[in-house]
Structures are given as C-alpha cells and as structure tokens.
Image (cartoon, rainbow, N blue to C red):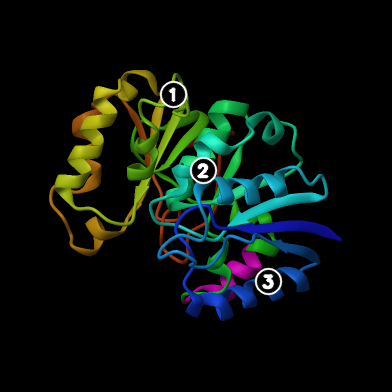
Amino acid sequence: MKSVGIVACSDAQKPEWKEQNQTLIHFLEKAGNKVFVSNCIYEKMGALSGTGKERASELMKFFSNHDIEDIYDISGGDMANEVLDALDFEQIKNSNATFWGYSDLTTVINAIYSQTGKSSVLYQIKNLVYGDYQDMQRQRFINKSDLFNPSFRFIQGNSIRGVVVGGNIRCFLKLAGTKYFPDVTNKILLIESLGGKVPQMISYLSQLKSCGVFDKIKGILLGTFSEMEANNCEPDMISLVRLFAGNDMQIAQTKEIGHDNNSKAIWIGKEIEINN
C-alpha cells in the first residue's frame, strides 16, 4: 500500500470544507493509499491553521517519513511562503516524497527546486472532489499519462525544450529577491493566474522584466488567466506577454493548466519538450 500525506501550507481550510476533504481522503484510500493528515489543516486563529513554523514542521514530518511517496497540499491563498525559512531542504532533497500543490504553493514548489533541484507537481488534488469535472479528474488521476499531458498551441515559434519553472505569476514573484527564486537561465517559464486584470498583469510582467527574466529564459508557457479571460480584457494576456518578452521569444499556450477545475498537472523542475 502506498502512503501519502495531506497538508495545508497556505491559508487554513474552513470548517465547512471538512466533508469535502473527507471525501478526498476516502477516494485516496479507495485508490490504495494510506493517508496521513497534517495537524495544521483547519482554521485555528482566523485564517491560520498554525504558525509558519508549525505548518512547516507538519510538512517536514511527511518529507522525513520514507514511506510517504506523495504530499498533497490542499490549500491556497497567500501565506505559503511563511513556511520557507523553517524547511529543512537537505532533508527534502533526500526524501522519497513528491510535493503537489498549486496557486500559492508555487512558492514552495519553486523553492524546493531552487534549493534541492527536486521537481514537484503543479496541481490541485481537490479537483478530484469539487467542480464539474470530478469524474474526469479521478480518471486522469488513476491514469497519470492523461493527467500529465496538457495540450499546447504555439503563439510564437514552433518548439520549446527546457526545464519548467514558475506557476502562478503573482505567487512566483513573491520569491523575487530571495534565495528561493530559481535560476531562470535557459528555463521555460510557466505563468497562469486566477485573479487580476490588465493593470495587475502589467505590474507582474514589469517586475519579471526588471528581474531580467525575459533576457534569460528560453521560452514561455501560458496557462489560463481566469479573471482576464472572464472579463475579455484588452489587451489580452498574449498581447501583453508579447509586448514584454518580445517577438523572438518562443511562446506556447494551454487551456489545461491553471485554476479551472478541469486543469491538468505539470512538473515544475523537469524538462519539457513541445513541438508544433
């Protein structure tokens, strides 16, 4: 039997989500997993399920357990980067476990890569128990080849090959200026977003440009930008990225990576090759 852990390194889960989370645990158990659950999941002090050190300690408890193969973070929000300074990256490097998370967990995922060279999965495991695509997501989860096979179309260029970094654009930029920001040289930058319209995206892209990111990367993967797309914002994200990254940058787009419930998974810290 495979052992897995469930954590919440970002904002605490609300009490009314317990039934939904229990459904997830039951599904994972039925799929042949022994499930261990963090003691820092639900609200204890407002939006906190514990202090940053406490949440980090719960995560490290699973990374140090050599029986655990996957750690699923079910949270999101704003506070995941609070745990970074309390993590033992040497122990994470030597761990058998793979970390899974999305959105605000972009901070933890990229910090793990920058500090250990270890890859993690950008995916929200709770897609298995909420939204309109639960059955499809459960089938994908059982058949991993479909889960890790998002479809791309090229905006500029016709091929991209390199190690993927990034994730949620706002959360990725929380690492800028810290030791946790990955070396982006010759990397493929993946960006997506839940919130934010044109002013916010220009702010994020400007910061990436000021950090020299567009001068170093080999290409860009665009996921979904939920609020931008829902409001049919103009200029759209493709136009904005072209403006900041230039006409020579390799750019590909997918509708299957992001905050939508039908999103697929992608490895951060592993090489990807996409051809037109």
Residue 28 occupies quadrant: bottom right
Label 3 crowding class (10 Å Cα cut-off): few <14, some 14-19, many 20+? many
Q: Earlier in the sequence, mark 1 or mark 3?
A: 3
The answer to whether marks 1 and 3 mark residues whose Cβ atoms lie closer than 8 Å is: no
Q: What SS does tag 1 mark?
A: loop
Q: Which residues are magenta?
A: 132-140
Query: On the rendered structure, is 145 left or right of 14?
Result: right
Residue positioned 46% across, 26% down in the render:
187
Q: Earlier in the sequence, mark 2 or mark 1?
A: 2
Residue 136 shown in magenta: yes
Residue 191 occupies quadrant: top left
The residue identified by callout 2 is: 83
Q: In this picture, is 95 found above or below 187? A: below
Q: How far is disc 1 from disc 3 in space, using C-alphas? A: 36 Å
The prevailing secondary structure element of the residues shown in magenta is helix
Q: What SS does tag 3 mark?
A: helix
Placement of the C terminus among the 4 image quadrants: top left
The residue identified by callout 1 is: 184
